[in-house]
Image (spheres, rainbow, N blue to C red):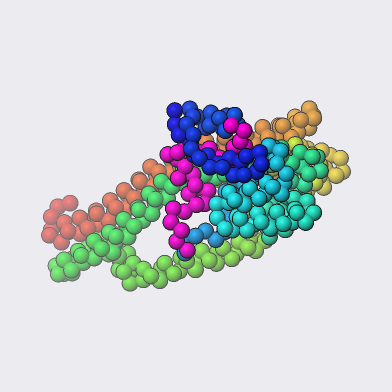
């Protein structure tokens, strides 16, 4: 048995917090329901502090450390909690009152207050969300609009929450896998810089005092150390300027299109990026279709939410062919820009009348493939970085050693 810190709502709409004992999270939720409460959160007491920090709370309210923006994680949490409250039968405006009290920080509370005021003024929820200056994507807003039209807003919100949580889980998995290789690469680079700037120059007076020529490799290493000492700051500035110029150039549609095309067609990384984009396309389109959005309208929304302009162009062409009655799978296959397995699965979905289900299956398949491919790539990257570091350090050490042996006329 463990202790769980919970937040729940009474049938009257009052927020309650406390601690209870249960065997699991599901058991804690069941106990809260038996008590006549609507469970909002139930975190194991030992992990409650970490969960609150992840949700946005800070243990010390230092002004300059306070959060000043709304993250995608905040949107996901709000979506899940709103779905829970509406599913329990609370009215929309009362649900927003409760969410304001549960907000992790002031910006979220302010946003929820604006949405509540719009809803109280008679605006539909989709319009109130659309007015929040781009915080909610067009995909999100259209999902809500479809839920309102079909009278299934709580169900749509639950699906939205699941969609956002799956997308976040994939991002977190990739980020977590990248932490160690990035740290290893940074430490490797700093180690090489330290050797060239702090260690190698100490041998220079020794070599100069003997008035003997040193090997070419030693001259190269000593020259590299001199360059880093003299122009290290300028090199960092130059790198920063190059990154800034590259970021500016990526805003040019033509440059961005060429980069996006290379990302999905490249021989090394193309397969991974094409699967990532296909998983996103399939999950978004499948979620829209399962909530009553027409295929033509759903493709228009998906095109705007695609991060890759090269594939977005193809989706636009597919949408035009769809209007002419050619279906979805055939134009996708003719474009040659989408993975063949995904296209065949989509065609099967069209033939069986279960396109939305098949799209979700495509998303599941490619999510798994992407995760496996990234883990394999990162597992290979770590020894490669170590070998490169070992090779560079070996070259530096051998350059000094060979020079010392040459200076003192010792056999190598």
Residue 141: x, y in percent? 73, 50
Residue at 25% in and 57% down: 399
Boundaries of the magenta span: 35-63
Question: Residue lying furthest front in this view?
Answer: 12
In the image, residue 21 above or below residue 397: above
Is 281 on the left or on the right of 394, as rendered? right
Residue beneath the point at 32% across and 60% down: 193
Closer to the camera in the image, 77 or 281: 77
Relative image position of residue 253 (x, y in whole percent): 67, 61
Please tell me whether residue 169 belongs to the stretch shown in magenta. Answer: no
Q: Is residue 89 above or below residue 23?
A: below
Quadrant, the N terminus: top left
Q: Where, by quadrant of the figure, is residue 291 drawn?
A: top right
Where is residue 204 drawn, in percent x and y? Answer: 21, 66
- Number of marks present in the image shown: 0
Q: Where residue 41 appears, x then y in whole percent?
A: 56, 40
Residue at image x 68%, y 58%?
114
């Amino acid at each position: 048995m463990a202790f769980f810190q919970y937040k729940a709502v009474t049938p009257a709409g009052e927020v309650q917090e406390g601690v209870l004992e249960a065997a699991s999270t599901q058991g804690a939720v069941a106990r809260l329901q038996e008590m006549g409460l609507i469970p909002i959160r139930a975190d194991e007491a030992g992990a409650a502090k970490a969960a609150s920090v992840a949700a946005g709370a800070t243990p010390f309210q230092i002004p300059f450390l306070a959060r000043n923006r709304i993250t995608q994680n905040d949107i996901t949490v709000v979506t899940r909690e709103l779905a829970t409250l509406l599913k329990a039968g609370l009215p929309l405006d009362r649900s927003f009152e409760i969410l304001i009290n549960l907000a992790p920080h002031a910006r979220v509370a302010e946003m929820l207050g604006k949405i509540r005021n719009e809803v109280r003024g008679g605006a539909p929820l989709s319009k109130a969300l659309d007015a929040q200056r781009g915080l909610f994507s067009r995909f999100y807003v259209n999902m809500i609009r479809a839920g309102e039209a079909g009278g299934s807003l709580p169900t749509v919100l639950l699906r939205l929450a699941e969609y956002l949580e799956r997308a976040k889980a994939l991002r977190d998995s990739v980020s977590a896998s990248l932490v160690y290789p990035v740290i290893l690469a940074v430490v490797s680079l700093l180690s090489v810089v330290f050797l060239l700037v702090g260690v190698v120059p100490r041998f220079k007076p020794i070599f100069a005092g003997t008035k003997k020529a040193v090997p070419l490799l030693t001259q190269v290493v000593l020259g590299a150390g001199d360059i880093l000492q003299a122009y290290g700051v300028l090199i960092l500035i130059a790198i920063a300027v190059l990154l800034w110029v590259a970021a500016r150039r990526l805003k040019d549609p033509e440059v961005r299109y060429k980069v996006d095309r290379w990302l999905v067609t490249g021989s090394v990384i193309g397969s991974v990026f094409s699967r990532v984009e296909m998983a996103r396309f399939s999950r978004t389109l499948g979620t829209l279709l399962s909530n009553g959005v027409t295929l033509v309208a759903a493709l228009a929304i998906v095109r705007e939410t695609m991060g890759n302009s090269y594939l977005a162009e193809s989706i636009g062409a597919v949408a035009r062919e769809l209007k002419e009655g050619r279906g979805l799978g055939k134009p996708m296959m003719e474009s040659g820009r989408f993975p063949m397995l995904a296209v065949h699965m989509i065609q099967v979905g069209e033939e069986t009348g279960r396109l939305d289900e098949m799209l979700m299956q495509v998303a599941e398949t490619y999510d798994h493939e992407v995760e496996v491919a990234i883990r394999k790539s990162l597992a290979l990257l770590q020894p490669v970085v170590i070998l490169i570091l070992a090779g560079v350090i070996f070259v530096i050490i051998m350059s000094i050693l060979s020079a010392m042996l040459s200076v003192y006329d010792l056999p190598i």
